[in-house]
Every structure is written in C-alpha cells, then in structure tokens.
Amino acid sequence: MACTLRTVPATEKTVRRSALIASAVLLSTALTAPAALAAPKPTTSPSAVPPARMSTVGGERLGRPGTQVNLAAGVPVLPKELSARSWIVADAESGDVLAAHNAHWRMAPASTLKMLFADTLLPKWPRTTTHRVEPSDLAGVGAGSSMVGVKEDETYTVHDLWLGVFLRSGNDAVHVLSAMNGGVKKTVDEMNEHAEELQAGDTHAVSPDGYDAPGQVSSAYDLTLIARSGLQKKDFREYCSTVRAQFPGETKKNKKGKRVRGSFEIQNTNRLLSGDYDVPVYQGIAGVKNGNTTNAGATFTGVAERDGKVLLVTVMNPQKKESNGVYKETARLFDWGFAAAGKVEPVGELVPPKSVEEANAAAGPSASPGQAGGTGTGSKPVASAHTGGGADGMGVAFGIAGGVVVLLAGGTFLVNRRWPLPDLVRRRSRP
C-alpha cells in the first residue's frame, strides 16, 4: 500500500507516515580533505551495449534494453540531455518505477557500492565504539583510493569512521571497519548475502569499498534497492545527509612539547548536497552516495523530497563529457520525476526484501501496516534537529528556503506489498 500525503501550506505541514529525509544546507566551497580522489586504472573494459536480455526483477519491462516509460497526455517528456548508460527514477515510498533506461545492466558501481557496505555493517556497533588502527587494517587499501585521512596508531570512534565513509568516500575508513568486522573477505561475503536478501541479483561485491575489481558489478535497479533499504536506518539517513563534519587529525606535539590531537573539516563529495561552482544544491536533496572510477565512470544514487513526494534516482556512467555531469543528469531526472509523479503509469516496481515478501505472503493480502509486524503508526517528533557545529562539528543537511529538520522516532519495517519507508525526517518551513 503506497503512502499518500495531503498537500498543505508549508507552515501547516505535519509529519506523515512513510515520509523521507528533507533538504540540504547551501554549501559550495571547495573540498579540503588531505587526500586526492584519484581513480584506479580499469581492470576490464565495460561493454559498449546493454545485453539483449537482463533480469526482470521488478517487472518484465525493466529487463528490456533502452528507455522504458509510459508517455501519455499530461505526462512530461523525458529530458533530452541524458547520456548515462543506465538510470532509474522511482518513488521511494510506493516502490513504483516511473521510468528507467537499461535498469538491470550490470556495470561497475564504484563507491556507490559503499551503500551496500553501510547497510550491511551499520547495525554492528554503537557509534561510540572506539578502535585503535593497526597497520594491518590499512594494508589492503588500493592504490589511488579516495581517502579521509585515517592514521595508523590513532584511535577513532565508529561514528568518525562512518563520517569518513559517507562524506569523503574514504576507502581507508572502509578497510578499518572491515577489519573490525573480521576482515575484508568476511565483510564481502556478508555484503553479498545481504544483496541476495534485498533481491539485488545484479550485484556482486568483490571489494567492500567499490574499488574496481574483476567481477564486481551492480545495476541502477539494485543500487536503488540498496539505497531504499539503507534509508530505513536512522544512522544511514543521518550520515548520507551530512554536509560537513570535523574529523580527528593526527596526534602531534605542540610548541610546548605537549601531545595534542586536532581535527580538520571534511565535506560531502555529493555535489547535489554540498553544491559546486556549476551545480547548485538541489532543493529537497538528502543523500545518498556518489562514486567515480576509471572503469565505472561516474555513478550516483540520490534521494529527494518535494511537495510530499519522495523520489530515488540512480544514474550510472554518463557518456557526455561535462563537469559534474552525473549530478546534472540526476537533477534533470529528479525534475522530471516530480513533474510526472501521479501522472505517469509505472513501468515496474522496487521489490521488497525476501524476508518482507515472505512475511507478506504469510500474512495474506488483507494484512495492513502494523498487523504483520509493522509499527508505522503513531510516530511523533522527538526533537528538533541541531543546526550543525555540535561537539563533533557535524553539519547535517538542515533545509533550504528556511527549512528546518525534525527527527522522528524510528520504526520497524512496515510489512505490506510495497514495503514503504518508515517515518523518517520531514522538512517544515519556518513561519
């Protein structure tokens, strides 16, 4: 059952069940992390054309090559300036796929695979858990990796490390967390098991960080499924919507000979969230994750809310050579999706995880949210969000056009046919 939201004036907007994260702080300064985001050399050459037959998970049309959309009277035409090899526009709450292009084409995912890493490992430790980094923790980081600046023999909280993963796409932070989890192999095995549970059958992880590796693939459809699953988790929502934060530096002696440890600012490399000279912050954006390697090209999955609608867009490997092209094409697809929502007939759907699908089948067609294990009703705001710059220096995406963020009590999955999102975060305009 899809979530429907009544449109009301901004000053009267109330949080409804199945709503998603809200907007972003305007920030377009240059990034200042200590390591470059160089892409590794490709290990294989990507196919130039999509397969004639692809997976049909989510609907038969999603397995066809080319663009799939039901254009009709009143439905806006798709943007002309789209060059991505694969993309998808979906309603994050109902699961409806509004349009897609080679949705199940298996391609290198780059760092968007970190969404699967995070969705798999985030529940493992409280954010206050600390870990002292051993040299062996960083031994497997690939040459040219994006780094947040983790140092050997320094101690970090799990919270610090997740900020490094989401904001700077730090492969060093990924490998430290993998070491805490028993190693890269164990972590990758768990990621693949979780992908199977999500019915993300196009996805096969080889490295936990998305670093190019033979056989490592995903698809626009799968990355959208993974993002939708991750957004069920409060910490995932917080980290993917964080624009800037303070990250612990290296312990050094000051002029008085005393050992001190400072910090430095890290900023999110998601340009629709942080902005850039040629890309404004996208209204209503709230994450999720970007990536870029030589083999994968640019990849991105984003989530945004506007007028009560919450959309997920994934774009993989734009062929047009332009600055920030993956974000520009994503923004165009978001614009189309918000204009088309409620008017266009879907071409498929985002399937629920296996366990939810099985629970639906066991509960029967008459089950309503809450009857089959959901707790989606009655959630209320518990606190207004901080406006950034707290003890950890975090700046979460806190609204544009005067918006503020309200944090809601988390809920378990609502078990029904469409697996809508639980109560999350909603923007409310200031008077």
Image (cartoon, grey):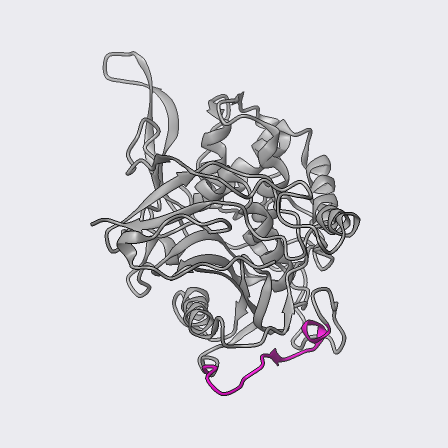
- Work out whether residue 28 can be spotted: no
Residue 257 coordinates in the image, percent (x, y): 28, 12
Q: Nearer the viewer, residue 154 or 316?
A: 316
Q: Is residue 66 magenta?
A: yes
Picture layout, residue 37 above or below residue 322: above
Question: Where does the image place residue 41, in percent across and percent down from the top left?
Answer: 58, 57
Picture layout, residue 224 above or below residue 210: below
Instruction: Give x and y (percent) for residue 224.
Output: 58, 58
Viewer-closest of 404 and 81: 404
Picture quarter with the N terminus: bottom right
- Which residue lies at the image location 41% right of the left edge and 67% below the top edge? 331
Can residue 240 be seen here? The reply is yes
Q: Residue furthest bottom?
A: 73
What residue span does the magenta drawing correspond to? 60-76
Residue 181 vs residue 379: left or right? right
Magenta stretch, main secondary structure, is loop
- At 68% from the left edge and 64% from the top edge, which residue is drawn? 106
For the point 45% across and 52% down, the residue is 287
Q: Is residue 112 left or right of residue 104?
A: left
Q: Is residue 173 above or below residue 414?
A: above
Depth check, front residue: 297 or 35: 297
Occupied quadrant, residue 76? bottom left
User: Left or right: 251 with respect to 403?
Assistant: right
Confirm whether the magenta stretch covers residue 117: no
Q: Residue furthest front?
A: 366
Q: How many marks?
A: 0
